[in-house]
Structure formats: structure tokens, C-alpha cells
Amino acid sequence: MHAFLNYSLLQAWFPSEAEIWNPPTWFLSALSFANFTLPAILPQIARLSKDGLQKLLVALSTVSLLQKLSYSQAWKFYCCGGFAEKTAHPYLWNVTRFHPFGALVEIVIGAAAARSVMLDDENQKPSINPLWLFLASYASLGLRLTTLNLNDAMIRTLLFMPLYTKFLMEIHRDCLTEKPHLITRFFGSKLMTSLGALAFPMFILHGPIGQIFYKKKIAEKLWGGILPKKFFPFYLLLVMVAGHFTNEFFVKSKKVQQFSAWLARKLADSTKGMLSDAVPRDSSMEKLAGA
């Protein structure tokens, strides 16, 4: 069963199985669902005005927040006065973190934000230095250290995601200006773009590589026990090197790219019209009007 869920990329739908084999691949499971549904969603987003997109962002953020409130047991998502709420069942936390529907909501938030930037006036400039939004988004994580004890899910939905989404929108606008801010130039530097290319391979590979050194049963057989914290920099370096080779010899491979393009065309041809209305909207409305 685990093999079927893993190779079919369905593991994220099942809370107890979301992290089987290679835990980070839950994202590929959720992303596959998003890719299947986005052909029906993106055309609807493209029809919206900037005002409509703003309303959509608010609505989607609210939907995302409802799931986090569910996990947090509504008003009991904080602790105060020595009262400590018992930890929720881990399966509920896995639903909150990994469920494909929740991931789809966040992906559509990103699509709506990108579309909003596309509709900018030609001379529109960033309303704020992106640096402040970047700092504010990561500073919000500091709320975990306060007496409110907000959980990660609530902070992410209420503060981090809105601030970071705004940061991405503003840094895009800033990079189109004649004199981009320092943070925009920094993230556009060769060093950061090179590291950015390694991000996804590292995300996928850090799990299986980490199990060699930190999964108890495996580490005990190979090394006599879990490796100490001082080994972590070497582990990180190993993941970076593995990510680099994966990026250079797999992601950038012409054969892989050609196969991916062929498969994408094949899927597009075989699914053409599957997510569209059987009867064009205009003609169906004309029939109703005629009746």
C-alpha cells in the first residue's frame, strides 16, 4: 500500500501516510492535485479585475484560516495564565500541513497575487521598500516566543503568508524600476539565483539523506547511533552538493526536459476539454434566452 501511495503521489491525501518513505514528497503529491485542477481555475482568475482579485485573496485566506482554527480548537489556540491546551492528535496536524486542498488554496493565492501584479499600470511603482515586508514577515515568527504561544499554523496564515505575498508582489514591481532597492538587487544576484536553483532539489533530497545519519534504526546500523549536532554542517553541505548534481545532471538535462515537454503535450492533448464546460457558456445562455 505504501508503494502504491508513494508512486501514485496520493500520500498527502492520507494523514497517517503523508510522510512515508521520503517525507518531502508530500509536496509533490499536493502539487499534482493542484496541477490537475489549475487548468479549470486559472481562466477564472484571469477574468477578474484587480478589485476582484483582492476579494479573492481575502476569501481564500479566510478559507485557509478556518482549517487552522479547526486544528487550533477555535479559541483555544493560545495559552495564558499557566493554562496549557493538550496537543491535538497528530493526524489532525498532518491534515493541516499536508492536505492537497489546503495546498491548492495557497497555490491559488499565489496565482491571484501574480495576476494582480500583471494588471499593474505600466508606471506603477512599489508602495514600500520590499525590505520592510521581508523583515516583518520573518519577524512574525517571533510570536512563537511570546506568552500568547501562537502555533505555527496560525502565525503562517494570519501574518507570514499575507506579508510574504505582499513582499513578493512589491519586489517584482521594484525589479522593473530604474533603481531597484538593495534587497531586490541582492535576491537577483548570481549567488542567490544559483542557490535558488538548488532549493527544490535540496528540499526533495534532504529527507532520504538525513535518514542515513539521523533515523535511529538506520544510523545505529551504519554509525552505531545518531550522529551528533556538530555533524549537521557536514550534512547540510552534503545535501547542497547532492542538490547541485541533481540540478546540473537531471533538472538541466536536455533529455529530461525533452521527455517532460513530450509528456506535458501528451497529457494536454489527451485531457483537452475534460475540465471545460460541455456546452460553451455563450451558446448555452443563448438557448436559455431563446426558450
Image (tube, rainbow, N blue to C red):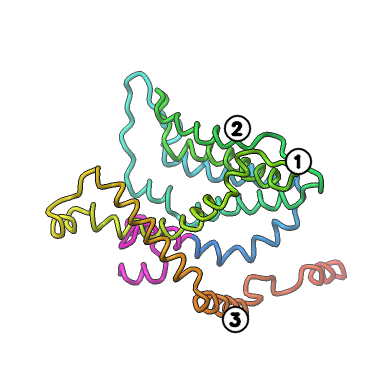
Say which of 33 and 281 sits in front: 33
On screen, residue 4 versus residue 253, left or right, reads left
Query: Where does residue 177 sit, x and y in percent of width and height?
Result: 74, 44
What residue is rendered at 32% in x and 27% in y? Answer: 84
Q: Earlier in the sequence, mark 1 or mark 3?
A: 1
What's the distance in space between the residues labelled 2 and 1, CA to CA?
A: 16 Å
Q: In the image, is residue 34 part of the stretch drawn in magenta? A: no
Nearer the camera: disc 2 or disc 3: 2
Say which of 104 and 126 sits in front: 126
Query: Where does residue 261 sit, x and y in percent of width and height?
Result: 57, 76
Label 1 residue SS: loop
Q: Main secondary structure of the magenta part?
A: helix
Q: Earlier in the sequence, mark 2 or mark 3?
A: 2
* Residue at numbered disc 2: 132
Q: Which residues are magenta?
A: 1-30
* Residue at numbered disc 1: 125
What's the distance in space between the residues labelled 2 and 3, CA to CA?
A: 47 Å
